[in-house]
């Protein structure tokens, strides 16, 4: 009985790990966002965005719109800064199901997933805080298999109450300086908000 429980625990961990790796690669080397992400029933947001599930607020810069999926708990939103070349910024929160514990742990998992199929050209880490909650900022340059273009990922990660909060910018070298200004403005606007009630996450 103990053997069977251990076996199923191992299988579950492997499945979760494979799913996490696939998600990380899709985020760093995919074609995010998926077609139709900015169409109903997904919800558009402008101005001040408040997430009642994870308890944070962030400002969406003028002339930009963020979109949240219609299904499942509301974790955050994504916005396209450019379709060609592709530049995309996502704001996301999630429970730490992989028990990464730290921002560095989350980033290491991402990097390991990318390296399974693609090339990490460079990776720079620095300390960062979202509204006084300590975390990290990771600027990673990636070359995806079969694609000669270099992608720049500027990823801010904070762990709080076993939850992962992140703002991730995918850009290209020729756009990165301008796109990073949008990310920086959103980082400065971030505030923690009390939810006032319990949600299923």
Image (cartoon, rainbow, N blue to C red):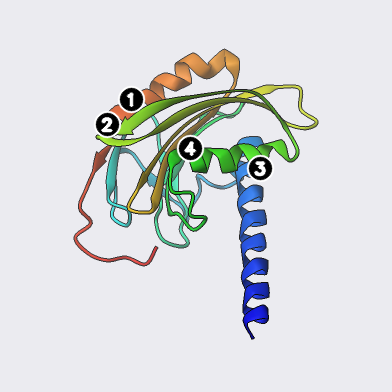
Query: For the residue labelled by badge 1, is the local secondary structure a helix, a strand or a loop?
Result: helix
Mark closest to the chain's N terminus, 3 or 4 = 4
Residue at the spot x=60%, y=28% of the render? 86
Q: Nearer the viewer, residue 82 or 127?
A: 127
- Residue furthest right in the image: 146
Does residue 69 sit above or below 183 in this rendering?
below
Q: Label 3 belongs to which residue?
A: 113
User: Real-space Cα distance between discs 3 and 2?
Assistant: 31 Å
User: Real-space Cα distance between discs 3 and 1?
Assistant: 29 Å
Labelled disc at residue 104: 4
Q: Label 2 belongs to which residue?
A: 189
User: Real-space Cα distance between discs 4 and 1?
Assistant: 23 Å
Residue at the spot x=64%, y=48% of the render? 21
Disc 4 and disc 2 in contact, CB within 8 angstroms:
no
User: Real-space Cα distance between discs 1 and 2?
Assistant: 6 Å
Q: Disc 3 or disc 2, which is closer to the eye?
A: 3
Q: Disc 3 or disc 1, which is closer to the eye?
A: 3
Mark closest to the chain's N terminus, 4 or 1 = 4
In the picture, measured across the screen, residue 111 lies left or right of residue 159, that is right
Residue at the spot x=33%, y=25% of the render? 185
Query: For the residue labelled by badge 3, is the local secondary structure a helix, a strand or a loop?
Result: helix
Disc 1 and disc 2 in contact, CB within 8 angstroms:
yes
User: Real-space Cα distance between discs 3 and 4?
Assistant: 14 Å
In the picture, measured across the screen, residue 54 lies left or right of residue 66, that is left
- Residue furthest front in the image: 2
Mark closest to the chain's N terminus, 3 or 1 = 3
Mark closest to the chain's N terminus, 4 or 2 = 4
Q: Label 1 belongs to which residue?
A: 185
Q: Position of residue 59 (x, y in %)?
A: 29, 34
- Label 2 neighbour load within 10 Å: few <14, some 14-19, many 20+: some
- Label 4 neighbour load within 10 Å: few <14, some 14-19, many 20+: many
């Amino acid at each position: 009985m103990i053997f069977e429980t251990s076996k199923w625990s191992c299988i579950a961990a492997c499945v979760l790990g494979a799913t996490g790796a696939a998600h990380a690669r899709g985020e760093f080397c995919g074609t995010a966002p998926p077609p139709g992400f900015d169409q109903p029933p997904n919800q558009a947001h402008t101005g001040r965005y408040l997430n009642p599930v994870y308890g944070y607020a962030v400002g969406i810069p003028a002339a930009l719109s963020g979109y949240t999926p219609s299904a499942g708990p509301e974790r955050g939103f994504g916005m396209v800064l450019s379709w060609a070349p592709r530049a995309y910024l996502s704001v996301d929160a999630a429970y730490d199901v992989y028990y990464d514990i730290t921002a560095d742990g989350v980033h290491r998992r991402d990097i390991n997933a990318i390296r399974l199929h693609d090339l990490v050209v460079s990776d720079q880490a620095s300390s960062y805080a979202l509204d006084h909650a300590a975390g990290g900022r990771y600027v990673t340059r990636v070359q995806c298999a079969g694609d000669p273009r270099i992608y720049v990922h500027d990823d801010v990660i904070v762990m709080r109450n076993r939850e992962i909060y992140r703002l991730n910018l995918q850009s290209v070298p020729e756009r990165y300086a301008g796109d990073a200004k949008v990310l920086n403005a959103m980082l400065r606007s971030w505030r923690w908000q009390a939810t006032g009630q319990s949600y299923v996450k």
